[in-house]
Image: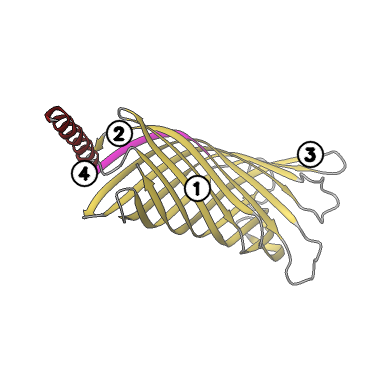
Amino acid sequence: MNKMIKGLALFLTIICAIQTGNAQHIDQKLQLSFSTGYQREDFHWSIAGNTNGQNPNVLSELKWKNVSGEDYSAALQWNFWRNITLFAAYSRQNIRSGTVNDMDYNADNRTQPVYTGNFSDNKGNITAWSAGAGYMLFNNRLFSLIPFVGYGNSAQYLYLVDLSGQFPDLNSTYEAHWNGPFIKVHSSLKIWRALKLTADVTYNQVNYSAQGDWNLITTFQHPVSYSHDAKGYGINGNARLVYNLTRNIAVSAGYNYFNWQTGNGNDMLYLTSGQQDKTRLNGVFRNGFEIVGGVVLAY
């Protein structure tokens, strides 16, 4: 009997030690988060009249404004061996509204406009995924700091439609991909009892590629009327408040901001005659924000 009692006491001591040890870590070994929210972004690009960026320096410009809709995302963080931590995330935004402006110019610096068109974007989606590995520099009951390296992709599936009914068959598309490696720093800070603040900053070095289909222009090939390529970068910043309801379940609310852009690149136009016209892509720019809420499961 005494041996049983001593054995039980030893077992309980070990369990308590394990629980106490885990309680010292603000980031637990396995964290799985799900969130949903509202995302909005602006996106635009322009091309010049020739490959030297002249004649004129801005020939045509497309601007998507207030492209918005609901967003869903999931993320996994797993400290699988010693201080080595793996990370993976996926998100998808369903586009519900947005405006598109198409402008063509006959002279430099956006002067002598020769065409303007205002359209809408009420469909399509924007997706992103990333995966990487990090090293846990700090992880105690008050603070954690983990730098990551990895690879990611962000894809935009955008449309031009005419809701006024003037061009009922307008259904032009623009599909863009931002691919490349990233470096990321993630941190957690205890604020008060079960409440903590998490934040991360990510720098992405990307290759940009895109293709568009201007479906009503008969002199352009379909489904690929033109293509773009360039090199660029993107910066993401995220901050969330996380409140633990229990040891393993928490709720979160946060704000995300992103700003991506490219340098000069190439625009290639494909004509039904078989001719290909090349000019300079002046750059691609996107920025926006997301407001999210969700749940975090930790073990």
> Mark 4 = which residue?
141
> Mark 2 = which residue?
136
Q: Nearer the viewer, mark 3 or mark 1?
A: 1
Q: Which of the numbered marks, if any, corresponds to residue 284?
A: none
> Mark 3 = which residue?
276
> Where on the picture, by quarter, is residue 202?
top left
Q: Amino acid type of disc 4? A: Arg
Observer-nearest residue: 202 or 63?
202
Report the Cα–Cα distance between label 3 and label 4. 61 Å
Q: Which residues are magenta?
A: 143-152
Q: Amino acid type of disc 1? A: Trp
Circles 3 and 1, Cβ within 8 Å, touching? The answer is no
Relative to 15, is 126 on the left or the right?
right
Report the Cα–Cα distance between label 3 and label 2. 51 Å
Is residue 149 part of the magenta span, yes or no? yes
Q: Which of the numbered marks, if any, corresponds to residue 260?
A: 1
